[in-house]
Amino acid sequence: MDSDHEIYDMYSDDEEEEDSTNIDESNIVFYKQKNYKILKDFHIRQLVKEDISKISTILSVPRDVSLALLRRYNWKVDRANEEWFANEQEVRKSIGMFLCDNNNNYVSVSKKTKKTNNDAFVNCGICFEEYDDVVYATCNKHPFCKVCWEGYIGASINDGGPNKCLALRCPDPSCEAMVGESMVVELASEKDKSKYYDYLFQSYIEENKKIKWCPYPGCECVVEFEIGSDDYSVICDCSNGFCWNCLEEIHRPIDCDTIAKWKDINQEESANTNWIMAFTKKCPKCDKSIEKNMGCMHMTCRCGYQFCWLCFKKWGVCASRCNRYEEKKEVTEAKKNIQRYTHYYERWLSNGKSKEKALNDLKRMKDEGLKKLSDDNSILEKELEFIIEAWEQIVECRRVLKWTYAYGFYLPKEEVAKTRFFEYLQGEAEAGLERLHHCAEKELMEYLGSSNEMDYTDEGSYKEFTNFRSRVVGLTKVTGNYFEKLVMELENGLQDVTNSTKIIEQPMSSSNTSNNMWMCDRCTFLNEDIHTVCRMCIED
């Protein structure tokens, strides 16, 4: 590749060497998952260079032509090559390569001509001044002076936007000859050149079907996705999780069409449901306003009354099974529809807020909480990593649970068996999550709070800590299993509903489960009745 046609100096080899020394492809800058890669600015520049080089090598054309071809065919290298070999003359014409001289040679790049003393003066086609030294032209017919070219290119970049400056043509309105990158680099100001390449790389991203921006505000990362993958979930380096297909937050196991419908109905029904979405509610016992400032749904009022934030029943009575929608009698059909919608919407919204709260708690724990707990309790940070794992599980499960309420809203009313099976799976998963979330938020401080006077160097106290750690680890694993089962069933369309009818018919409790299963009092894991010891609690 000709050195004069390398990407502008702001992306010189010196900077590339400096950037490459800071890149750890196995870590952050070029983080690769099984079906996507996270790309930064440096990698986009490299991909653009590679594609231009491929076209130049295969077609034996200058860099300006390669870049024009890639822009013409949305940065698809194979398509550009195929179209060129299929009808070269038409492709040349489409990008502004015109037959201009007497030797049947195509003028493909911008050029400058130096006039000698024996040559006649040349008139600039814009300012009409006469010049006898250097003029610039994209073809043999329309020369212009340097000053006019600089003004023309600068105006195209600053006023015309990317569509104008990246497909620039001869200033003569009757001429469609292309203005190549090389002339822009030579004549544009430093500021304009920077903006030109910003437009160029933006074009590469936005016109490439395999690449998209991370939708998080302020994030400059780009995701290159493996087309054909079933799972659209992406975690960016900025920690933002989103769906590559619809750019909404990750919503597995709900499909993108359901998410779109849910968003539409939320906008339509918002006027009817704002009253129920306030941040405060009345305590069912003392009727005082109470604010939800933690993530789990277990509320404790100042009067001492403990109740469920969602259904207002005494805590433990509903056993976190208030996920089921029950129609109230003697109401109109319109009110039934609103009540049904508000049931699912409130739980969708509450779990979304709980997820955000848990995400903030996780961040604080990672940033400073773990070290403080380690210092205050004389325990190695490595022994406290189970806390981070628990919070990560809580965040993921809150996200899944949130979207299962959108799924439940769209379950056909006539499919009663599927609805009951769904509510059973959702209820079991939600109950497990509430136990884990409560344990991480409240019980943790009983063992590791800053006011705790226990000496964990003491054998007895340390044993108590290890028992607590085992409980949290067990709850984390069990909750993950519940939600993985829930996700798999929803993705399979609840096909196992017939085989699961027997389990659904018999409600679960800590002391009495179905004839085939029993629940461990310690970790809540469901065991088959052939086991006499909980498989989750067995020590290695």
Image (cartoon, rainbow, N blue to C red):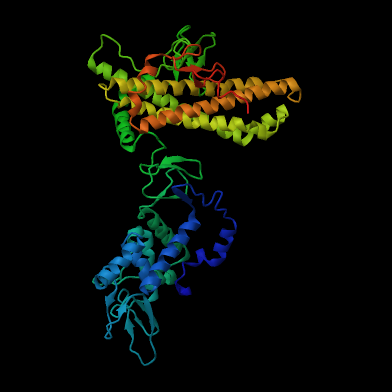
- Considering every residue shown, the one lying at the far right of the view is 458
**Residue 483 image-quadrant placement:** top left
Residue sticking out furthest to the bottom? 118
* Left or right of 45 in this view: 228: left
Q: Is residue 166 visible?
A: no
Q: Quadrant of residue 146?
A: bottom left
Residue 99 against residue 535 in the figure, above or below: below
**Residue plotted at (60% across, 35% down):** 366
View extreme (top): residue: 285
- Residue 195 position in % (x across, y down): 43, 60
In front here: 309 or 127? Answer: 309
Q: Where is residue 184 in the image (x, y as percent from the top left)?
A: 40, 69
The quarter of the image holding the N terminus is bottom left
In this orientation, which residue lies closer to the viewer: 486 or 281?
Answer: 486
**Residue at 27% of width from left, 25% of height from top?**
412
Do we see residue 138 in this rendering? yes
Q: Position of 236 compared to 127: left or right?
A: right
Closer to the camera, 197 or 247? 247
Query: Residue 156's spot in the image, x, y percent?
Result: 35, 63
**Is residue 312 or residue 58 the one in the foreground?**
58
Image coordinates of residue 410 in percent, x first then y, are 30, 27
Q: Dividing the image into 4 quarters, which one contains the C terminus?
A: top right
Q: Is residue 21 above or below residue 270?
A: below
Residue at 54% from the left image edge and 62% from the top image edge: 16
